[in-house]
Amino acid sequence: MLVRDAMSTMVLTIGPAHTLRQAARLMSARRVGAAIVLDPDTSGIGILTERDILNSVGLGQNPDHETASKHTTTDVVFAAPSWTLLEAAEAMTHGGFRHLIVLDGHGPVGVVSVRDIIRCWAPARREAAMAG
């Protein structure tokens, strides 16, 4: 199975000036664990995850004053839609990530998460166990 088959195409995109509270509200409303942060000034693509917000709040920082730009991961590992789920899982394991931004030739087209991979792998494992 390929990343394109597992990824979420419900991509939440925010800007670097969004506060962490704004990001959290949008992520909660869309039921996603990560937002793609597009910075038009740097032409950069980064990712802000629920863990980034949790870490900030845990440090006592104010989510109404902290901006996405201060908490965005910019050294992102990108996946291609044609990657296998094993390739994505290996990249996540190697980098310590739970989400990968999926890029095609035109920019971000989705996000694949550990949960997406498990959701796809679990039925296949169950079917293999029942067949064997």
Image (tube, grey):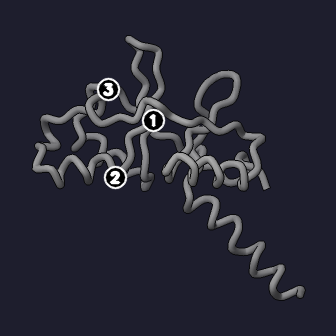
Instruction: Find residue 62 and report its horizontal and vertical position in percent.
Output: 11, 43
- Dot 1: what SS? strand
Query: Which-is-in-front pick, marks 2 and 1?
Result: 2
Percent x, y of residue 75: 47, 31
Near-viewer residue (110 or 94): 94
Mark 3 neighbour density, 10 Å: few (under 14) some (14–19) many (20 or more): many
| Residue designated by label 3 | 16
Give whichever of discs 2 and 1 has the lower sequence position: 1
The residue depicted at 60 percent of the width and 35 percent of the height is 78
Count neighbours of disc 1 (C-alpha within 10 A) and say few if under 14, some if 14 to 19, many if 20 or more.
many
Counting from the top left corner in percent of width and height, residue 103 is at 64, 32
**Placement of 41 over or under 77, stated as above or below:** above
Q: Nearer the viewer, mark 3 or mark 2?
A: 2
Q: Which residue is mark 2?
A: 51
User: Label 2 vs label 1: CA separation?
Assistant: 14 Å
**Which is nearer the eye, 76 or 66?**
76
Q: Residues within 10 Å of mark 2 (few under 14, many from 20)?
A: few
Inspect the image, locate mark 1, and give the three-letter code of the amino acid beneath it.
Answer: Ile
The quarter in which the N terminus is drawn is bottom right
Left or right of residue 63: residue 88:
right
The quadrant of the rendering that contains the C terminus is bottom right
Where is mark 1, residue-wise? Answer: 36
